[in-house]
């Protein structure tokens, strides 16, 4: 039982940054923009968060700086793709390369420096009991991620602004012709995606491993991008998907480290599960006759008004 | 740099101007220019950091008789050839390729610059102007294992590996052989994570092992993530790898294995200066000071420090070689008979685990 609880705690840690970054990308893509720069923005957020945590010791300020740095990086992308109508795929890839190099440069003098981890959000008494620990024992970003899932879902499906954002992503020409600023809405979405990726990056030094290391996000930004497709652009499925990926990533290690029950499923199978799950989901999606794949119709297309 | 005509004339001229003294291709020099290429960044606080410390060591000792240049983040592939050529064309007399994966490029480029000395770390392909060098990190592992044998309460250790290559397998085996000299029931669990640098995964692997009962952890990856988790969970301890990592876990680091390439780099640079450089094949360790142990942690008791020191000094004076039989593999088959010591060639191709290593999943 104790081991089960310990595994849950590790899974939650592994899933949280992926969920936060993917949630940002989901909103970006719902507005019709494909930003493949998530990994780069996460790294920029990670170094910004680390530097602020190192100098101030205030993890909330560190998260905010991660968000600010991620937003700044996303504005580069926004300017190129929205204002100048550059190719989104190429620009996003360039942003990832830029973020990797820039964060390495900015972090070059912070290599042998530890920081302190973010403390749990809720009072310790709540986390005294093992079950309490599993529910109440996390720091702020874990709960933030859950709240944001609900908030994004509510925003997209129950608010006027969310409807406009979806309209921009589904049919930019129509949205434009009835007077909405397509570029303006997309800028806001891209900035939100940048802020979320920045926060997700800052989670690495604050939540998972209190240090700065070059490329420390190690490809999780790409998992976040893939998860958005996996979740067919829906926030609740994204939550399930992020935790599923977190679970298999963690279980692979627990299965390798342990004997007994855990080794019933070989670690190789755990390692292969995310890919198997992706294939199964894609097959299921394509089998459904009543619905499309749910991809925003204008995803990845630059907006050039026709009138 | 593309090969400009001017540079080409300069390099060609320099090559022709070299006096043809006897059969030796290497002349005495007033000043030596040494190039280093690193596979990662000098700020990784581990492997590449240690090589760069070696470069600084040479500068410190040779002063104005040496000029060094380095290129970091060089990918293991065709790009490495370009970097090697550039260094040679810029007038380097001696070039260190510090990663295993640079080997193919060195073998291609070196024949084109016969008057430049090349040295390749941890490789196996030599040549008329290609020397090989490596370090006996397993000697440091034996010291760590001795400490683990004394201090662990559960007798279960965890070991985070990158890939199951002989270098890593050798380290795991040395660690547990030393630990079992103290605690014959001790076991070690290797977990391979298929990367040298993914701190979050290293940390989660450490958590996975600690949650399942290990209380001492070692790692053969580039960063201090596992050590930090050990501190966070309050287990007995862990070890620094490549460099002293006590800044990351002052209470938890029991000691560290420090790569100290400086003396080797200095010796090679001096040999090139004197015109006596010949391609060598060195595999040095604690004795030659190429492998060093970090400071012992405050929580390591005096008698354990004494035992660890005995293991360290024993390997220096040659009275102890951790791979001396009898050694059984982890299926119980005797691999090394009593009194026999494994040869270097056997060690460098080691692909089996000794008794006490739980077969990795």
Image: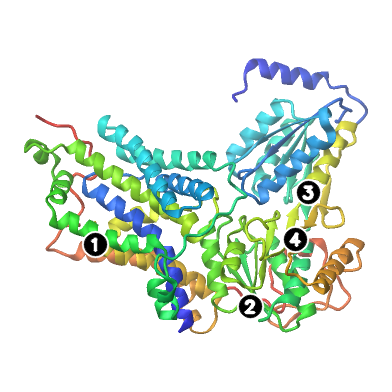
What percent of the width, then of the height, locates residue B259? 74, 52
Q: Of tags 1 and 3, which is closer to the observer?
A: 1
Asked if badges 4 and 2 are on one and the same chain, I answer yes
Left or right: B21, with A178 as reference point: right
Q: Of tags 4 and 2, which is closer to the observer?
A: 2
Q: Residue B133 carries which label?
A: 3
Give the chain letter at badge 3. B
Give the chain letter at badge 2. B
Residue drawn at point x = 42 percent, y = 63 percent = A139
Asked if badges 3 and 2 are on one and the same chain, I answer yes
- How packed mark 2 is, by other alpha carbons closer than 10 Å (few <14, some 14-19, many 20 or more), is some
Q: Would you name the residue on which mark 2 appears?
A: B358
Q: Distance between the residues labelled 1 and 3?
A: 58 Å
What percent of the width, then of the height, locates residue B358? 63, 77
Q: Would you name the residue on which mark 1 appears?
A: A150
Asked if badges 1 and 2 are on one and the same chain, I answer no
Q: Do the residues labelled 1 and 2 touch (CB within 8 Å)?
A: no
Q: In which quarter of the image is residue B51?
A: top right
Residue drawn at point x = 80 percent, y = 36 percent = B60
| As drawn, B263 above or below A153 | above
Q: Distance between the residues labelled 4 and 2?
A: 21 Å
Upstream in the sequence, badge 3 or badge 4?
3
Q: Of tags 3 and 4, which is closer to the observer?
A: 3
Q: Distance between the residues labelled 1 and 4?
A: 56 Å
What percent of the width, then of the height, locates residue B294? 76, 58
User: In terms of secondary structure, where does tag 2 sit?
Assistant: loop
Q: Quadrant of residue A228?
A: bottom left
| As drawn, B176 above or below B34 | below
Q: Would you name the residue on which mark 4 appears?
A: B348
What percent of the width, then of the height, locates residue B152? 69, 77
Q: How far apart are marks 3 and 4 (CA)?
A: 13 Å
Q: Of tags 1 and 2, which is closer to the observer?
A: 1
């Amino acid at each position: 039982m104790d081991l089960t609880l310990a595994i849950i705690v590790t899974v939650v840690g592994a899933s949280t940054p992926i969920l936060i970054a993917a949630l940002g990308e989901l909103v970006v893509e719902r507005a019709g923009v494909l930003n493949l720069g998530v990994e780069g923005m996460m790294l920029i957020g990670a170094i910004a968060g680390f530097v602020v945590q190192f100098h101030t010791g205030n993890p909330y300020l560190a998260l905010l700086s991660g968000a600010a740095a991620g937003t700044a990086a996303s504005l580069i992308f926004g300017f190129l793709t929205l204002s100048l109508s550059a190719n989104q795929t190429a620009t996003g890839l360039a942003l990832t390369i830029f973020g990797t190099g820039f964060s390495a440069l900015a972090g070059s003098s912070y290599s042998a420096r530890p920081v302190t981890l973010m403390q749990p959000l809720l009072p310790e008494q709540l986390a005294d009991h093992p079950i309490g620990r599993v529910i109440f024992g996390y720091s702020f970003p874990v709960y933030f991620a859950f709240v944001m899932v609900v908030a994004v879902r509510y925003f997209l499906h129950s608010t006027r602004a969310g409807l406009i954002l979806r309209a921009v992503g589904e049919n930019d020409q129509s949205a434009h012709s009835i007077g909405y600023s397509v570029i303006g809405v997309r800028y806001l979405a891209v900035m939100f995606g940048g802020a979320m990726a920045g926060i997700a990056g800052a989670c690495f030094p604050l939540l998972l491993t209190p240090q700065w290391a070059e490329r420390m996000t190690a490809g999780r930004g790409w998992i976040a991008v893939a998860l958005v497709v996996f979740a067919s652009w829906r926030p609740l499925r994204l939550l399930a998907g992020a935790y599923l990926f977190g679970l298999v990533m963690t279980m692979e290690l627990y299965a390798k480290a342990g004997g007994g029950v855990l080794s019933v499923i070989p670690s190789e199978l755990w390692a292969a599960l995310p890919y198997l799950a992706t294939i199964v989901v894609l097959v299921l999606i394509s089998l459904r006759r009543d619905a499309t794949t749910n991809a925003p119709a204008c995803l990845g297309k630059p907006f050039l008004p026709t009138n | 740099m593309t090969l400009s005509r001017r540079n080409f004339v300069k390099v060609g001229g320099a090559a022709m101007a070299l006096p043809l003294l006897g059969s030796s291709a290497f002349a005495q020099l007033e000043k030596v220019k040494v190039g280093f290429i690193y596979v990662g960044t000098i700020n990784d606080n581990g492997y590449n950091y240690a090589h760069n410390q070696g470069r600084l060591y040479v500068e410190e000792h040779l002063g104005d008789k040496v000029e060094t240049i380095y290129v970091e983040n060089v990918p293991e592939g065709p790009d490495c050839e370009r970097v090697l050529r550039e260094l040679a064309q810029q007038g380097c007399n001696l070039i260190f390729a510090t990663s295993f994966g640079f080997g193919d490029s060195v073998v291609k480029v070196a024949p084109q610059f016969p008057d430049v000395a090349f040295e390749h770390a941890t490789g196996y392909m030599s040549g008329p102007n290609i020397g090989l060098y490596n370090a006996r990190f397993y000697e440091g592992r034996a010291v760590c294992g001795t400490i683990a044998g004394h201090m662990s309460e559960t007798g279960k250790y965890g070991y985070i590996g990158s890939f199951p290559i002989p270098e890593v397998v050798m380290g795991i085996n040395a660690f547990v052989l030393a630990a079992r000299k103290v605690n014959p029931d001790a076991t070690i669990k290797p977990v391979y994570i298929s990367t040298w640098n993914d701190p979050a995964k290293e940390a989660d692997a450490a958590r996975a092992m600690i949650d399942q009962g290990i209380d001492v952890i070692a790692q053969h990856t580039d960063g201090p993530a596992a050590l930090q988790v050990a501190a966070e969970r309050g287990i007995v301890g862990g070890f620094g790898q490549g460099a002293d990592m006590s800044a990351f876990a002052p209470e938890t680091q029991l000691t560290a294995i420090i790569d100290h390439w400086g003396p080797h780099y200095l010796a090679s640079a001096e040999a090139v200066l004197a015109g006596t450089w010949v391609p060598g094949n060195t595999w040095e360790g604690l004795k030659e000071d190429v492998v060093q142990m970090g400071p012992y942690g405050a929580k390591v008791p005096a008698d354990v420090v004494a035992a660890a020191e005995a293991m360290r000094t024993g390997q220096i004076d040659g009275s102890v070689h951790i791979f001396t039989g009898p050694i059984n593999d982890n299926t119980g088959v005797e691999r090394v008979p009593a009194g026999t010591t494994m040869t270097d060639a056997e060690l460098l191709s080691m692909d089996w685990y000794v008794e006490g290593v739980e077969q990795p999943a």
